[in-house]
Image (spheres, rainbow, N blue to C red):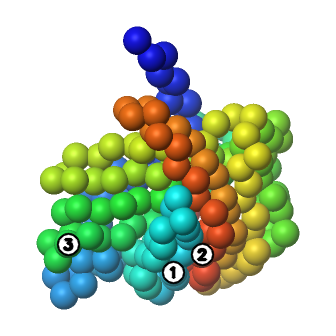
Amino acid sequence: MKNRRQPSYMSIFIIAIFLFFHFSCDTNDDNPNQIEGELGNGETTALVNGESFEAPPGSTGGLLQPEAGGSENFYLFNITALVSLNNSGSDRNIIALGLVGSNTDDIEAGTVWLANGTVRAYTGSYSEVRNEEIKVLASSKIGSGDSFKLTAIDTEAKTISGEFSFSGEDLYSGNTYTVTNGKFKNVSYSEL
């Protein structure tokens, strides 16, 4: 019997935030990739095992929680991108990125978060939704070389841009998923 790695708390957090976006936002009937709401016109692109992942405008959003868990010394920042695979939008592939830190002053252009960070940490996950069931195929591991770099942030317009990469093992099949060349630009975010 193969030992399976248990999901990290960060992975669980990312899934929870994704579910928030998934169930609180409706898709546009004319374009199932576009989520109706305040997600803006940002785009996300990446390669997943060498295959193109392109989330069109309106299908990526962010959520910043500056005082997560009631602590002024802890923040969470999540960015979620989705690509619909059918016209109804019920089948989707998702990339979710989670940033954790102790000081929101860190959230500025040029800051880098690492999966093995002690002051700032980062995790990424790749999931699929089929018939409204979510399955996390891979999430980055603590201690890996996964990274996230913030390239721009506009706190007035509440938009964010960045670059990311991560890899992880599918907890169900043991397959490895590698996400490279990840970029998102002018993604709108909300603040709790």
> Considering only vertical position in the picture, is 181 above or below 170?
below
Is residue 98 something one can see in this rendering? no
Q: Quadrant of the N terminus?
A: top left
Q: Secondary structure at mark 3?
A: loop
Along the polypeptide, which appears first: circle 3 or circle 2? 3
Q: Secondary structure at mark 2?
A: strand
Inter-mark Cα distance, 2 to 1: 5 Å
* Amino acid type at image mark 2: Phe
x%, y% of residue 7?
50, 30
x%, y% of residue 103?
79, 50
Which residue is disc 1 drawn over? 43
Q: Nearer the viewer, residue 49 or 118?
A: 49
Which residue is disc 2 drawn over? 184
Badge 2: residue crowd in 10 Å (few <14, some 14–19, many ≥20):
many
> Considering only vertical position in the picture, is 154 above or below 21?
below
* Amino acid type at image mark 3: Asn
> Considering only vertical position in the picture, is 81 above or below 38?
above
Is residue 33 something one can see in this rendering? yes
* Circles 2 and 1 in contact, beta carbons < 8 Å: yes
x%, y% of residue 140?
60, 42
Q: Nearer the viewer, residue 108 or 93?
A: 93
Which residue is disc 3 drawn over? 86
Residue 95, numbered circle = none
Front tag of 3 and 2? 3
